[in-house]
Image (tube, helix red, strand yellow):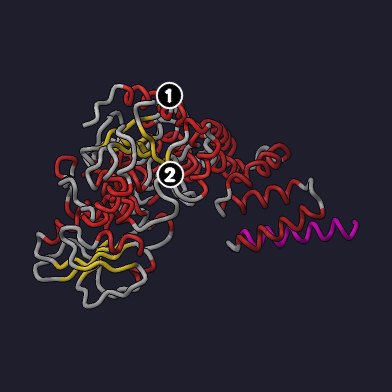
Amino acid sequence: MTTTQTTVEDLIGQGQASLSANAISDAVRFFREALALDPENGMAKAGLGLGLVVSEKFEAALPLLEQAISSIPRDTRLLDALAIAYLHTGMPKKAEMVLRKSLRLGGSKTDTMINLASVLNECGKFADAEAMFRSCLRRNPEHALARYNLGLLELLKGNLESGWDGFELRNKVIGRDAPTWADQCPAPMWNGENLNGKTILVYAEQGLGDTIQFVRFAKSLADMNARVVLQCQRVLVEFLSDVEGVSECIAVDEAPQDVDFKVSLLSLPFYLGITLETIPAPIPYIHVDHSKLQEWRQKLSGADGRPKVGIAWSGNPDNKTDYKRSIPLNLMQPLLTQEDVSFFSLQVGDAADQVLELGKADRPGQMFEEKLPFQDVAAAIQCLDLVISVDTALAHLSGAIGKPVWTLITHFPDWRWMLNRNDTPWYPDMRLFRQPSVGDWPSTIEDVRKALSSHRFS
């Protein structure tokens, strides 16, 4: 045996030990070093692929796992990882095929069944997914991931009362009790106790859109005679300070003072017993700063007299579901040819540069040259006649300030958009345009184009 072979084997052994110890960055390094010495080594490709999946680098993992599977076709661990990579790179049908093979080879392992049920959701096979989640729960009634996913399915179907309980497991399934900023507050969790005269910290938990959507529930707590301290992302602090029911607004890196209870913003629907009929939707519940509004009206005063439509085609690339919700601007090109409308890009950053890929006649005007405070973004949007957006914080923002917004929804939507409806009780001025099948954005854009061509602007 040569020194090179021994070194490769040693590196693979160290990588596998690191994987077992959940030292993923070390594992990835060892497997990369092994492949540098032996680029065709199947074990090194398999190990690196597994490490990259755990690191959520799915596109990089995909070719490695495909190559490893070709030489180790019956390894169910690799099959499961390959399916996850397929799912997160927009290929749920391939993921379904691979997971079914894994179940045939390895038996009905609960984790594989849950992964398959999640993939069936992505494929729009909701009844099959629900049956599989329930099958997992018959085996283990306390399986947190199965309960959580079943809760999401109930929410998706509009059965909010049945779904909130499972939704409460969202942190447990990723191995934490609460976000770090909430853990630093010593106050006990609120479980529905009397709040009369009490101060309660309501902390943000997930993305900006979630915070904008759920901040409406602050008023429900204030109506219980509570003093509500909202703890949210720093970029939203000033913007949300005047929301009805919020007494004080602080950032997630600030320590609250003299708090009696704490609760996640996303848990309020559970404790308040919110149903489809009782979602608070007094629109607008976030108000635009008057001085900012005047500034933006002045900035846009030179625009022609055509209706002004803002478009957003890309969300936060760090979001786990961004691979399926964001689209390239060129897919929106059929909309931009409508000559009786003035289009404005609401994008900043790398996505905004896609405007340059269009012909000059089709390029939307650039609303923002750089990232601006949310007060400015809201005021600018308020000056438009309509917003057309993929599922991003901008869509939530538009809905919350009462601006008509058309939101483009994936075939397997986020739970809040439910199924088989083009409206939403969360935002009365929002219209939903859904993919007819997985990945079919062109048909969705065509539906929007037809609607826009006949739309009467007020």
Q: Residue sitting at 30 percent across and 48 percent down?
A: 397
Q: Residue sitting at 25 percent across and 73 percent down?
A: 187
The residue labelled by disc 2 is 366
Q: Residues within 10 Å of mark 2 (few under 14, many from 20)?
A: some
Q: Magenta segment, which residues?
A: 1-20
Q: Nearer the viewer, residue 457 or 139?
A: 457
Q: Residue 361 placed where, x, y %? A: 48, 30
Query: From what the image shows, is residue 236 above or below residue 92?
Result: below
Q: Residue 363 placed where, x, y %? A: 47, 35
| Name of the residue lying farthest toward the bottom | 258
Q: Residue 238 placed where, x, y %? A: 28, 63
Q: Is residue 281 visible?
A: yes
* 288 sits to left or right of 15: left
The residue labelled by disc 1 is 443
Q: Do the CB atoms of the residues marked 2 and 1 lie less than 8 Å apart?
A: no
| Name of the residue lying farthest toward the front | 302
User: Which element is circle 1 on?
Assistant: helix
Whether residue 5 appears in magenta in the rendering, the answer is yes
Front label number (2 vs 1): 2
User: Which element is circle 2 on?
Assistant: strand
Q: Nearer the viewer, residue 302 or 97?
A: 302
Q: Amino acid at mark 2?
A: Gln
Q: Nearer the viewer, residue 303 or 31?
A: 303
